[in-house]
Image (tube, rainbow, N blue to C red):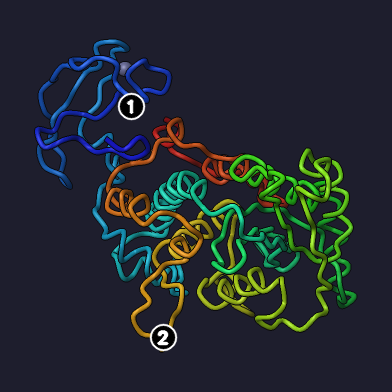
Amino acid sequence: MHKLLALPGPTLDPPFCPRPGCVHHLSPVEQSWFERDGHHETRAFGSVPRFRCKACGRNFSTQTFRVDYYAKKVVDYREFEELLASSMSGRALGRHFGLSPDSVQNRVDRLSRQALAVHSHLRAFADPREPVAIDGFQSFDRSQFFPNNITISVAGDSRFLLEATHATLRRSGSMTTDQKAKRAAHDRAVAYEASAIERSFAELLDQLARDRPPRKDQPLVLVTDLKKEYTSALAAHPLGSLGKDRVARVLVSSRKPRTGWNPLFPVNYWDRELRKDQAAHRRETTCHARSASNGMARFWCYARYHNYRKRYLVGSRGNDRRKHADVAGIPKGVRLGLEGLFYQARAFFSRSSLTTPGMRAWLKLFPTPGTDWIGRIPAYALD
Ligand SMILES: [Zn+2]
């Protein structure tokens, strides 16, 4: 049984108790920890065997362990993921799969939780010697009055995305008189987060400190632009006190040409990919995110697709089938061990080693500016 994702076995025996905190949750401690409890009939999945945990009394079925738990309609998640990663809008996805807008979002949310769990597990295997480029990707939620900053960290040559978090910023730049009046109205209604960029940068540093702690013979090399928020966030972070022989920061002016030679190329590359492949981030888009958390759910679906499915070298270079994850040093066997389960075995919050931004994305806690709307998530997604 895989310690992250697992399905009922060939005789339909459940792999673990689905209740977080139960002694049989992470891994059953006895062989006969459950008893059979009949069947129930479903329209989408037919007759489903039911069980009861002898330790905590929780009732569940084989469906409890499936990505499609509680879904009324089965979709091909591989295809769904691919179309979502090819700039298809939510409406177009709904037409293609015969789903309502809410059901499309429901499938995006399911896929994003799978992505967060699997990526949190696999990125710890990435080679810690690659330099890490960090920068903010600018887009917007709700309307152009609410620019956001999705700060991302990307490993050097592999262009493997490590971590991402979201912040809402106050709109700046040139505006018409009309737009200025509108912004003033928003300013009265919206509380902007203080030090949002510093907080975002620190969250990305947390992941690096956890998954690739720098050592003397293996320093962490950070590549960033000259933002002073990054300087103060690094100074205040535990990584900032380790000394330059362990944590080295390479500063690159954001005015430098955005070529492959630029040390910020990994984040510039992601900027281009996101604008090309994500309907929400296309220039002059009408498909922008209506909610910050829905936007981040789509972001993680895309990041997982790009890291683990998309080929590293696209185009004319022949037989190189390596994924970005392979180039980042994640053992192929480890990646493939989760590939089939990814679309089938439901990821559990309590069994996933999520970081703070990962938890926020899973629980849909990125606030949408000017609304009291944080995400809605079903009770089972809290397991
Ligand atoms: Zn139990």
Q: Name the quadrant where ligand 1 sits.
A: top left
Q: Residue at x 39, y 58 (%)?
A: 104
Which residue type carries mark 1? Answer: Pro
For disc 1, the neighbor class at 10 Å (few under 14, some 14 to 19, many from 20) is: many
Q: Which image quadrant: the C terminus? A: top left
Which mark identifies residue 367?
none
Which mark identifies residue 317?
2
Q: Position of residue 308 (x, y in %)?
A: 42, 61
Q: Position of residue 230 (x, y in %)?
A: 82, 55
Q: Nearer the viewer, residue 357 or 206?
A: 206
Give the vertical position of 288 relative to 203 (above or below).
Answer: below
Horizontal relation, residue 228 to residue 297: left or right = right
Horizontal relation, residue 51 to residue 260: left or right = left
* Mark 2 Cβ and ligand 1 under 8 Å apart: no
Which mark identifies residue 18?
1
Q: Position of residue 197 (x, y in %)?
A: 79, 53
Q: Which image quadrant: the N terminus? A: top left
Q: Position of residue 11 (x, y in %)?
A: 9, 33
Which residue type carries mark 2? Answer: Arg
* Mark 1 Cβ and ligand 1 under 8 Å apart: yes
Lower sequence index among marks 1 and 2? 1
Q: For residue 105, what is the image quadrant?
A: bottom left
Q: Residue at x 36, y 15 (%)?
A: 23
Q: Residue at x 85, y 67 (%)?
A: 172
Give the vertical position of 95 relative to 259 (above or below).
Answer: above
Horizontal relation, residue 148 to residue 361: left or right = right
Give the vertical position of 78 relative to 15 (above or below).
Answer: below
